[in-house]
Image (cartoon, helix red, strand yellow):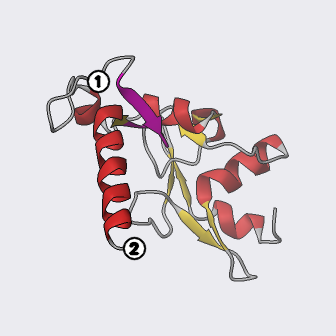
Amino acid sequence: MPEFNEALFWRKVERTKTCWLWTGYINKEGYGEYMSEALTTRLAHRIAFALDQGHLPDMPLDHLCRNRHCVNPDHLEPVTVLVNTRRSNVGLHSSSKTHCPQGHPYDKENTLVYGGKRKCRKCKNQKAREYRARKKASQ
């Protein structure tokens, strides 16, 4: 953890009955950010967790309260990226789709997963064939 003034950090926290709300800068994703005296920016909830636990995990911290600018260490749980994504509402609309835009089913045989996103195997293979044909034609 980089050097910073712990007292200054905690002054930017409002402790409510439920969450500890970050009152400093909130980024466009809704997370609190803290700029240290060394002019390094860190996510406020990660600093709070490290101060409480004595270490910072190499994993995302899931906000169990679903409040992104909460820094209460009791509301934070280290989880994998996949677990964090599954718990969130990100891609909720996409996850309910049963077919790709071209009508191929998202089933076990036809579905590839890249970076947590589903891809249609048939469409991917078709694009690869088209790419190889274009490349061959340009030679």
Q: Which residue is label 1 attached to? A: 106
Which quadrant is home to the C terminus?
Answer: bottom left
Assign a secondary structure to mark 1.
loop
Q: Nearer the viewer, residue 83 or 55?
A: 83
Q: Residue at x 29, y 43 (%)?
A: 126
Q: Residue at x 75, y 82 (%)?
A: 38
Left or right, 113 with reference to 46: left
On screen, 106 above or below 30? above
Residue 116 falls inside the magenta stretch: yes
Q: Nearer the viewer, residue 23 or 112?
A: 112
Q: Nearer the viewer, residue 15 or 129?
A: 129
Mark toward the viewer: 2 or 1 = 2
Q: Which residue is label 2 attached to? A: 139
> Where residue 62 sits: x, y (%)?
55, 37
Q: Say few, some or many: other residues with alpha carbon within 10 Å of mark 2 (under 14 / 14 to 19 / 20 or more).
A: few
Left or right, 139 with reference to 137: right
- CA gap between label 2 and label 1 equals 36 Å
Give the magenta part as a residue range: 110-118
Q: Say few, some or many: other residues with alpha carbon within 10 Å of mark 1 (under 14 / 14 to 19 / 20 or more).
A: some
Q: Farthest residue to the top: give it.
A: 108
Q: Quadrant of residue 3?
A: bottom right
Q: Nearer the viewer, residue 50 or 24?
A: 50
Assign a secondary structure to mark 2.
loop
Q: Residue at x 15, y 37 (%)?
A: 102
On screen, 84 above or below 8? above
Three-letter amino acid code of the residue under disc 2: Gln
> Where residue 104 sits: x, y (%)?
20, 28
Marks 2/1 in contact by CB < 8 Å: the verdict is no
